Amino acid sequence: MRSILFVLIALCGFQGWAQVQFNASASKEKLGINERVRIDFQMNKDGDNFTPPDFDGFRVVGGPNQSVNNIYANGKKTYSKTFSYFLSPMSRGKFTIKQATVEIDGELYKTLPITIEVTAAVDVPKDGNNAEYVASENVHLVAEVSKRNPYLNEAIAVTYKLYVSEDVSVTRAWREIDIPKYADFWSQVKENRQRRVFEGKFKGRNYRYVILKTAVLYPQKTGELNIEPLVLDVPVEVLSNKRDFFGRRLTTTVNQTVAAGNLTIDVKPLPEEGKPANFTGAVGDFKFNISASRNQVDANESLEIRVQAEGDGNLKLFNLPELTLPSTLEVYDPKREENIKTNSSGMSGSIATVYTVVPQFKGTYPVQPLRFSYFDLTTETYKTITSDGTVITVENGPVSSDSTADDNTATAGGGTKNIIQTGDQFNYIKLKSSLQPIASPTFFKSALYWSLMGGPLLLIPIFIIAGKKRKERLADAEGQRKRKADRLVKKYLSEAKKNLGDSALFYESLERAMHNYLRAKLRIETTEMAKEKIAQMLEDKGAQTDSITQFIELLKSCEFARYASGASNNVAADYEKATLVITQLDKQL
């Protein structure tokens, strides 16, 4: 019985060893958005028609790498074949690596799905002296905060700078992976479109850097507030140890994920000591006044009373004091006007509440002064401004009583007084009319009747003539090509034309327009192609040599102007030249 049992166990072991296995595994199931994960698909027997999943939520930065292992140990053979992929996450969240398939011995096998969680950016340890490590050591994204301990509603600026050392190069094709939401802040982000390159130091080394954007923030809560990091995917060109035929070192392009890091802002509350009762949250440095569009009017004429605050501070985040007017003045709903600019130091400009007032009676109406309070960041104290009052004089119109003009003056506190009508204030309303009825004409055989009957008949020859003109226009192939070329010229060169006053922006827009034109015509991506390759493709498509030469020369001019700022001042001539060349190429292609 023991012998039989031993044989059965041995047979089961051989059967298990011979069973086909096809598994998927991940190097890590939880990673930061700036890390990478390796996915292995391993089989213990050779298979055909291997099909990987789509890797939704990830970008494939390496692979597929294939490895085969044949191991003989103790007279037994072990075989394994592995397909490896290196993935970089594109956003935060939970993602599923779906099933891969392979055909082994005529049977279809599938792997089990893998769930991977992507979190915020983390510190990545050093992993050796390779291209990715060199890129990580020479490209940095930094978020600089103007103040880490502001008051509530005090402006702070977060400036994002991309530092690149002189040992590597970075193209402009970086991509934002994760954008901060600025929770608990009023925010306005100012993108830097010019991308001017500065020289500076980072951790004691010489770097070049560009300012990507500046976020102006006004904290709306007190205590420690968190600012999420900005995360970019940056293509970095790194010099490799390989050399070309002439001995020049070759470059390797790797995609580096850089993050600005989490920021913590400790927001102080505004002091309670000395806070005025009419304080509505204004923080900064302001001036305050009340003004009227005119001080002398007649009854039923309108005027505007303007309550305005101007200066530097959180202009969009507080309300102005309300104006109280005499009850005998007709006041319409006020409107708010804003003239505000936002820069790296915060908001500046003015806000105003405009009241439209229509006096009904003759008299003198005083507008009482208003009090406006704000917190001054310079002295860290509350300040109150009292505006000047003004007087509205209504010279002509019905009087509100039979007393003197001084008695007719209404109080400014919103109080009321008895008004005695004189009986002539409604004389402008006509109470008796002299209207006469008119006979309603018969519709049948009227002018309107004949117009409706004959109008459609008159439109028939107009439609016939318009149809002939349209057919002639469609038959004109040369005209069609010219009109299409003109539309493409306007479409792709419109942005460049807007920047004629700025040489750097003009040539950047012109280069982008020319590549977009090629992409539309040749249905390929040309931004990374050599100019010789572009010229050859245009020639294969039937473009003439002169047009191709002019087009390539324009591309060279754009590159030269972009890397040597101010090198070209002939912007208008290059724009006209680009218009002509694109028109010619469009006809030829």
Image (cartoon, helix red, strand yellow):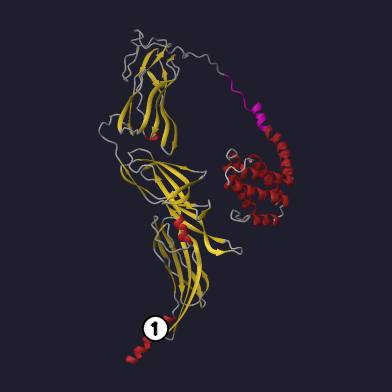
User: How many other residues sit within 10 Å of disc 1, few (<14), some (14-19) or many (≥20)?
Assistant: few
Can you say whether 144 is above or below 62 in the image? above
Q: Is residue 440 left or right of residue 206?
A: right
Q: Is residue 304 left or right of residue 455?
A: left
- Viewer-side residue, 154 vs 380: 380
Residue 358 shown in magenta: no
- Viewer-side residue, 122 vs 207: 207
- Measured as percent of width and height from the top left, residue 241 is found at 52, 64
- Viewer-side residue, 103 vs 271: 271
- Measured as percent of width and height from the top left, residue 589 is found at 70, 52
What is the quadrant of residue 214 in the picture?
A: top left
- Measured as percent of width and height from the top left, residue 453 is found at 67, 32
User: Residue flagged by tag 1: what amino acid is it?
Assistant: Gly
Question: SS at mark 1?
Answer: helix
Residue 451 shown in magenta: yes
Q: Quadrant of the N terminus?
A: bottom left
Can you say whether 393 is above or below 511 in the image? above
Q: Residue at x 49, y 65 (%)?
A: 53
Say which residue label 1 marks: 13
- Measured as percent of width and height from the top left, residue 280 is found at 32, 32
Q: Residue at x 66, y 49 (%)?
A: 553
The residue segment tinted magenta is 438-453
**Residue 459 visible within the image:** yes
Q: Residue at x 40, y 46 (%)?
A: 144
Q: Is residue 543 left or right of residue 67?
A: right
**Residue 544 visible within the image:** no
